[in-house]
Image: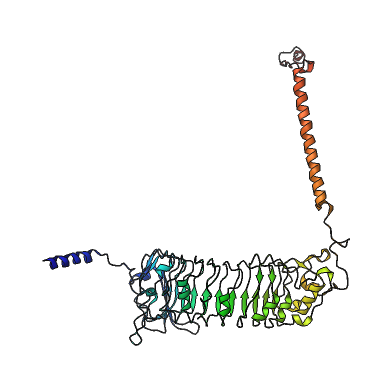
Amino acid sequence: MKTLSRILVLLVIVGTVTPESYEDGTSICDRCTCLIANKTSTVLSYDLLDCTRKNLQHMIGSWPERFITTDPEREIVLSLSGNNIVSLQQLPATKTTLVFSCSHCNLESLASGLFIDTVNILRADLSFNKLSGESLSGDVFRGQYNAEDGSVSLLLDELDLASNVITKLQVNAFEHIAASLRHLSLARNPLGQVTSSTRSALAQLTNLEHLDLSHCSLTDIDASAFDEMHALRELYIQGNHFTAIPQTVYQLDSLHLLHLAENPFEVLTFAQPLKQLVQLNVSSMSLMHTVEVESFQNVKQLKTLTVRNNMALEVFDLSVLRHVSFLKELDLSQSNIKHLHTPLENGAAEQQDEMAYKNTLEVLLLSGNPWHCDCALQRVLKYVQFSNLPDYDEDDETRCETPYVLTSLHLTDLTHIEVCDQPIHDGPNSPVYEKPAFLRPRAIFLSLLSVGIVVGLGIIIGLVIVCLKRRLKTQVMGFTSPVRYTSVRESKTSAVYQI
């Protein structure tokens, strides 16, 4: 009897459980955009299901009947972005290559085995949601069971988790995609620091080629975090709180691109070699005032260097070219640079080695800087053949700001005039340029003082007049008696004119 009652209770419980809801796949094309494209000479065959901003709250229950789901050579592109889904369920089964997006969906949780029935998932975009590290367990990214080796690996190539609320990763977060994942973005997550569990999770990604940790409030990265990332080619760590290149970066022997912009560097230096580095971005560093030229011996393969918008940087010595002989593109625009050489003190003659500037430079962007056009700058521009570079533009703002006689002269024109054989004064009539008289501190002070005296005298005179008027009103004087008015119509003189 007891057994029967327990069975009845279980049946009641099972009967009261609400079945998991899915969006109706048979009619989904009535609500979303469905497109079938066959292979042509320019595109591969694919099926598109675009449900962006369609007020969906659940995963679709099945694929539209017209979609081909058995051909691995075909691709399905599914977008659920811009919907209020909150809890993401498993995707419907397909053997085709899958590209999936659910960004801006208010996601807070992910189903276990999210892609278990989509064995050929290529890219997954889960950015701009509310996912935490706790919601990214290893079971989320597991694949189907492989009886031969007992694994449940998933062939996911690219994962975007940017702009979520991840403060740390679980150790096993990527264990089932560690071998396949090549692109990972954790940008704009409040990591703060790379904890031991986060370090362990990242260390498993041995085949990762692209890692984005930008704007994560990082101050340092654990020395062992990148130990096994021998395939990493692109690292984005801009917008953090680094004051120097993290030591662990030097362990990335395959690194080709390093993005360091918007970090509080004061001095840019390379403490160790980065033998494969070809692209470097150190822009928007408001505190960076010095670039260690000699340290560029450690990045000899550099081909593109971007140093834009660094307002504390006044000097960039182009003799750095002797260390980076393969440099093709150099962007120094929109900064506060006055010199392309290191000015010597005490007016000593500057000795410049022309061979230090010999290079295969193809692009040199110098606009938006307050250039001081002296003999040394003219020589450097001639050495690098600035006027012959293909990106030269006469209309840009690459112009002299000082000295006075060369103001607004384009730097390309500087190479065609005599600067070194004649003294260049800072003012039109004097060896040292002085501001106009009305802009000098003494003149400004005297002007303000004069205005103050005039205003003060005006106030005093006004007070004296007011006091005199009040005093006169109290005295008995003829002109202070009230004035009496007589109506013109009642006066006798008006009658004369009425006759």
Residue 473: x, y in percent? 75, 20
> From the image, which quarter does the N terminus lie in?
bottom left
Does residue 55 sit above or below 137 in this rendering?
above
Please name the residue shown 80% across and 39% down the image: 453
Q: Is residue 203 left or right of residue 372?
A: left
Does residue 205 sit above or below 367 in this rendering?
below
Residue 19: x, y in percent? 27, 67
Whether residue 36 is visible here, answered yes or no, is: no
Q: Is residue 407 left or right of residue 247?
A: right
Residue 358: x, y in percent? 74, 82
Residue nearest the viewer, comparing 213 with 414: 213
Residue 277 figure quarter: bottom right
Residue nearest the viewer, comparing 75 with 123: 123
> From the image, which quarter does the C terminus lie in?
top right
Scheme by which the image is coloured: rainbow
Q: Is residue 108 left or right of residue 162?
A: left
Residue 366: x, y in percent? 71, 71
Q: How many marks?
A: 0
